[in-house]
Amino acid sequence: MHISRRKFLRQTAYVTSAMASASTLAACGIFEKSPQETKTGRDEVERPVTQDKSTLYIYGWATYVNNQEVLDNFTKETGIKVVGDTYDSNEVMLAKLEASGGRSGYSIIYPSDYMVTQMRDLKLLAPLNKKLLPNIKNIAANYLDLPHDRGAIFSIPVSLGTTGFAYNVEAVKSIIGEEPLDWRYLWDNKEKLRITLVNDPREVLGMALHTLGYSYNTKEIPKIEKAFQKLQELTPAIANFTTDAWRDPLASGDLMICMAFSGDAISLARQDPNIKYVLPNNGTSIWTDTMAIPRGASNIEGAHAWINYVMRPEVAAKISDANSFGTTNKLAKSMIPDDLKAIKALEPSEAIIAKSDRIAKLDAEILQVYEGFWTRLTTGLG
């Protein structure tokens, strides 16, 4: 089962999707099913908030906790049972932890980089005890001093993700000839293309801002409006705004190019040689997923044991193989499968990194501006 990495949907859609995902995985035997049902009929997971050293409750993206071998080996070594619940957006996770007042029962969460900043500011994260994390030496130093959490005080980056092009090689070559190299390609060939853009206002408007020479994180309304207007030029080529429902149409040739997150696209490319994932050479969005311990965690000792375990090279390599994202573990890079290492876009080059942006936290007022233009774009309003 696939769950997208970074969705920015409305809150009600988030909650419905997250609960459905958890229920489905529970049926597969990977996650425990909730002991209760809400009046809506959806499972409402409640975890014990008292200290329990025999069980570790994890709340994360499915790809980080659905590898049974990884889970079983941790339990064999530590005697700690792992129970995982999933979310499909950072916002669902944040809402759940805020609602619990820091007493969610979870001891490990997997926030993306920008969400670490937000949760830190809300005092929802516990500082890490580096003395219990000797394997932190395996993480490349540059990932331990990123802007969202300088010095890795509250989080450990585990996966590297990017946003780029997934495209059907035969369809693109037969209709256009040249394969995509950068974001400008979309505008240069808009009359011939059939594309999708991710259902994510910060990514899509950010891409247009970037193409115009602005930052993904600009707070200047005139620049955001220019990005909106530039995206309007692509309207005839856009089949849909979707983060997930592009794979089958792209494989069949009904779609030619899809804006996609790296793990999603690389997973498909590993299955279908006619699909390629490339990073725009004029730069893109780069991001990391992290491990963190929420304030009020029910098993602090077990949480540190899990983080230290995941930072082992062989474990990090298994997780990278499962989710097709780049790894921050410098020793794991040589251990990932050859077919994954062969994909050049797995990790951006230094040249592309220099041209790229990381999406950062913005104030609520400016986010409303982004959402306003996004609504106009996706509903076809002028």
Image (spheres, rainbow, N blue to C red):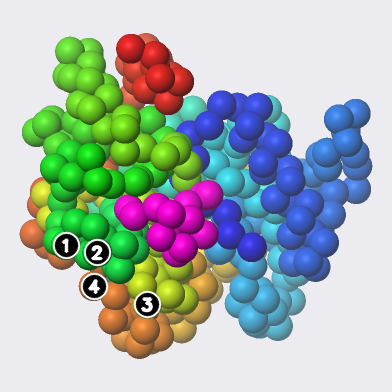
- Residue at figure coordinates x 67%, y 41% from the top left: 17
Earlier sequence position, callout 1 versus callout 3: 1
Instruction: Provide the residue designation for mark 2.
Output: 174
- Is residue 254 rendered magenta in the image? yes
In this rendered view, identify the residue nearer to me: 331 or 229.
229
Instruction: Provide the residue designation for mark 3.
Output: 273
> Looking at the image, do the residues carrying marks 1 and 4 touch, with CB atoms under 8 Å apart?
no
Q: 10 Å neighbourhood of mark 2: few (<14), some, or many (≥20)?
A: few
Q: Amino acid at mark 3?
A: Pro
Q: Amino acid at mark 2?
A: Ser
- Residue at figure coordinates x 45%, y 68% from the top left: 267
SS type, badge 4: helix
Is there any visible trace of residue 1 in the rendered image?
yes
SS type, badge 1: loop
Rounded to the nearest angstrom, the CA distance separating label 2 from label 4 is 24 Å
Q: Nearer the viewer, mark 1 or mark 4?
A: 1
Across and down, in percent, residue 239 comes to 42, 39
Q: Nearer the viewer, mark 1 or mark 3?
A: 1
Earlier sequence position, callout 3 versus callout 4: 3
Q: 10 Å neighbourhood of mark 3: few (<14), some, or many (≥20)?
A: few
Instruction: Provide the residue designation for mark 1.
Output: 177
